[in-house]
Amino acid sequence: MSRRIVVAYWLIPTEPTHSYFQNIINDLAERYAAPEFEPHVTVHVGVYCTDSVDEVLSRAARGSKRIALQVLNVGNSPEFIKTLFVTFAASAQLQRLNQRIRKATQDSSDYQLKPHLSLLYKNMSMTDRRRLARSIEVPFPEVAFDSLKAVRCVSPTRSRSDVETWRFVAGASLASFGV
């Protein structure tokens, strides 16, 4: 599979959940010699074009309210960027945001929205992943998100060094009213 530069559009959690997840990510990164990254839910991944990213975020955020997603469970997988993650229920509001970003980017990529917030990026055994997933309890039934970020990255991301090349490109706030 060829690798390319893409832009990932992230939904960023509000406080105090942002700090809660950041602490878990940082702790796991230190314990397992893994990369640190900002807690986020990827809404879309598409073609990287520096000229349009600010406009895409502006269009996507315009008229969008803060989004709350219901926590389902903590899962794991052999995929590097989904080693350990919190799974969320899809919502109509999140689907609309995904569609607005797709439309604004005029992107026909095959990205499939599967809302999750990764906690660890690391190649590790199934036994270790399962043990870790069982050890983490998310203390709230839903998580609110109030901003978007665009991040330039390599796709597919396969290693710590790939994560360390990620670069923030642009950001936008969602309306602070309504959950």
Image (cartoon, helix red, strand yellow):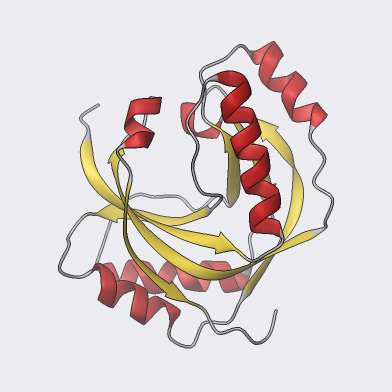
Q: Position of residue 177 (x, y in %)?
A: 65, 87
Residue 73 drawn above or below residue 34: below
Q: Position of residue 156 (x, y in %)?
A: 33, 34
Q: How many marks?
A: 0
Between residues 28 and 12, which one lies in front from this camera angle?
Answer: 28
Left-right relation of 146 to 138: left
In the figure, residue 175 lies in which quadrant? bottom right
Residue 124 drawn above or below residue 68: above
Residue 98 drawn above or below residue 23: below
For the point 20% across and 39% down, which residue is it?
4
Left-right relation of 6 to 121: left
**In the rendered view of the protein, which quadrant contains the C terminus?**
bottom right
For the point 79% across and 35% down, which residue is it?
136
In the figure, residue 125 lies in which quadrant? top right
Q: Position of residue 80 (x, y in %)?
A: 48, 26
Q: Position of residue 87 (x, y in %)?
A: 67, 46
In the figure, residue 104 lies in which quadrant? bottom left
**In the rendered view of the protein, which quadrant contains the N terminus?**
top left
For the point 66% across and 54% down, which residue is it?
19
Between residues 150 and 108, which one lies in front from this camera angle?
Answer: 150
For the point 61% across and 38% down, which residue is it?
25
